[in-house]
Amino acid sequence: MALVEVRNLTKSFDLAESAFAGRRSGEVRAVDDVSLDIHEGETLGLVGESGSGKSTLGRLILRLIEPTSGTVGFEGTDIFKASGAEMRKLRRDMQIIFQDPFGSLDPRFRVEDVLAEPLIVHETVSRELRRQRVAELLRAVGMDESAARRYPHEFSGGQRQRIGIARAIALRPKFIVADEPVSALDVSVGAQIVNLLQSLQREFGLTYLFISHSMPIVRYFSMRIAVMQRGKIVEVGSTAEMTMNPRSEYTKSLLAATPEIVIK
């Protein structure tokens, strides 16, 4: 059984009221009847152009937004039927890394408070143990323990994203949605973040849904790739299959439009 099972997932949004007609003009399906599996320990890359529905799908899978229809199973549990108490338990195992390292961290909180928050919410541990866990998290993402006493605005974009990753792994989750985690960073810093994610996956046995508009990064990082266009999954396959023998014309166009990159 897959760790995450998505079946016929759909999310529709009402279109904004027309400034000309003065009335609603229907709805748009950001996610349109999507089904896919994510297996334990793998990285499934989700790639497509901006506006294709990738981030909406990621948020649906974590139940950060509610679907119009369809189901998401996590370890056999339909998360959309889960009670508040059940979802609270599931949240320990399902986390997200956001795209924007500048906007995803509360500027009013020190780093130690940012990283301790999930421990306070989900675990009953002493203040001293929380401090030890915060120090461990910072070391795990390649940062010095002294960062704990500083504020997010004192760090670079790449460092802030490392802090965001530390927050995501604080509860030792099984599954992480990485939503465009390097798109706001320059290439060299983004490469460091991708390599960090790979290292953490090996260390903690993580499963990723890695969302990106960059086919080269997805090919480097992912074991399988799902291609999304206009709310639909048009193709899913192993990275080798998708690279050597893509079936859809859209996948071929993504491969042709993006240059190779070298990540060290």
Image (spheres, grey):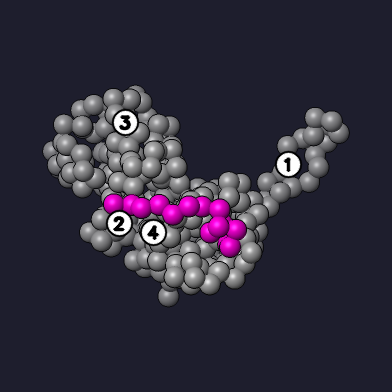
Please name whichever residue, 175 or 89, is drawn nearer the observer in this view of the structure.
175
The residue at the point 34 percent across, 47 percent down is 191
Amino acid under disc 4? Tyr
Q: Is residue 264 above or below residue 117?
A: below
Question: SS for tag 1?
Answer: loop
N-terminal label among 3 and 4? 3
Q: Is residue 160 left or right of residue 150?
A: right
The alpha-carbon separation of the residues under discs 2 and 1 comes to 39 Å
View extreme (bottom): residue: 1
Amino acid under disc 2? Gln
The x and y percentages for residue 103 are 43, 32
N-terminal label among 2 and 4? 2
Instruction: Name the residue carrying label 4.
Output: 220
Placement of the N terminus among the 4 image quadrants: bottom left
**Which callout, 3 or 1, points to the residue nearer the camera?**
3
In magenta segment, residue 40: no
N-terminal label among 2 and 1? 1
